[in-house]
Image (cartoon, rainbow, N blue to C red):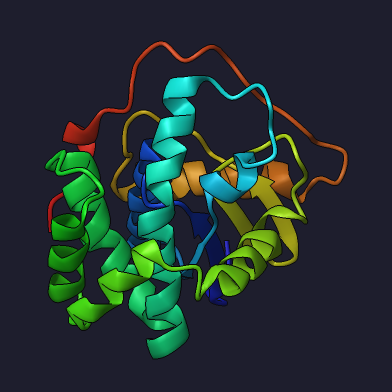
Amino acid sequence: MTDQRTTVDFWFDPICPWAWLASRWMLQVTEVRPVDVRFHVMSLSVLNEDKPDVPEAYREMLDRGWGPVRVAIAAEQKFGNEVLTALYTALGNRIHLEKAGYGRDTLEAALTEAGLPTDLAAAADSTEYDDALRASHHAGMDPVGTEVGTPVIHVEGVAFFGPVISRVPTGEDAGVMFDGARALAANPYFYELKRTRTEDPRMDTVPTA
């Protein structure tokens, strides 16, 4: 362990429940390790747009999923990267905890909570920021490879997918998991550690402010 601060870059799509849980874990890590986290936007819609074998129900979700990522990238483009932490939290609370969907009401409520103008919600139906969205997406995903989704983490030049967790560890448990993930990812010959998931995302484990 060291007292030198480390910046972790975390790529998310607001509609992904696994990324949401991992992001809440990462915020717990900042409480027990000398770590700062910066959030960035990737897009499951971009990731899967050219894949021919996507199930119809998932494709419908991806079609609706353009809205939240477009709003997030529009907010970042206009007001800077630092606004994404509050906006992601506001979006995630509504999408994953309140089950409010991805519609205009959800987007506007999240923008208001994050202290951002509600007219940014218009970006959900616009391609104006798609070039910036794709640039952000590829900045996060290209260093990891093609066989992953979100969350993606970059730390000290190392990029990796995951961790995929169904519950949010807190306190020192969060720090220990970060130490392990970071150690494994830092080994250039380590590629995968995986087991079958036995439960869906447990949103009731998300710490409350």
User: Which quadrant would the C terminus be assigned to in this image?
Assistant: bottom left
User: Which quadrant would the N terminus be assigned to in this image?
Assistant: bottom right
Report the residue at 67% width, 25% height from top. Answer: 193
Q: Can you say whether 206 is above or below 5 in the image?
A: above
Q: In this image, 160 relative to 202: left or right?
A: right
Q: Can you say whether 12 is above or below 176 in the image?
A: below
Tell me where residue 35 appears, x and y as whole percent.
48, 68
Q: Can you say whether 115 is above or below 42 in the image?
A: below
Q: In this image, 75 relative to 10: left or right?
A: left
Report the residue at 12% width, 42% height from top. Answer: 98
Tell me where residue 89 appears, x and y as whole percent.
26, 60
Which is more toward the observer, 149 or 63? Answer: 63
Q: Can you say whether 37 is above or below 120 in the image?
A: above
Tell me where residue 97 appears, x and y as whole percent.
16, 41
Tell me where residue 173 appears, x and y as whole percent.
37, 41
Report the residue at 43% width, 68% height from top. Answer: 126
Which is more toward the observer, 106 or 172? Answer: 106
Residue 52 makes an appearance in the image = yes
Which is more toward the observer, 145 or 56? Answer: 56
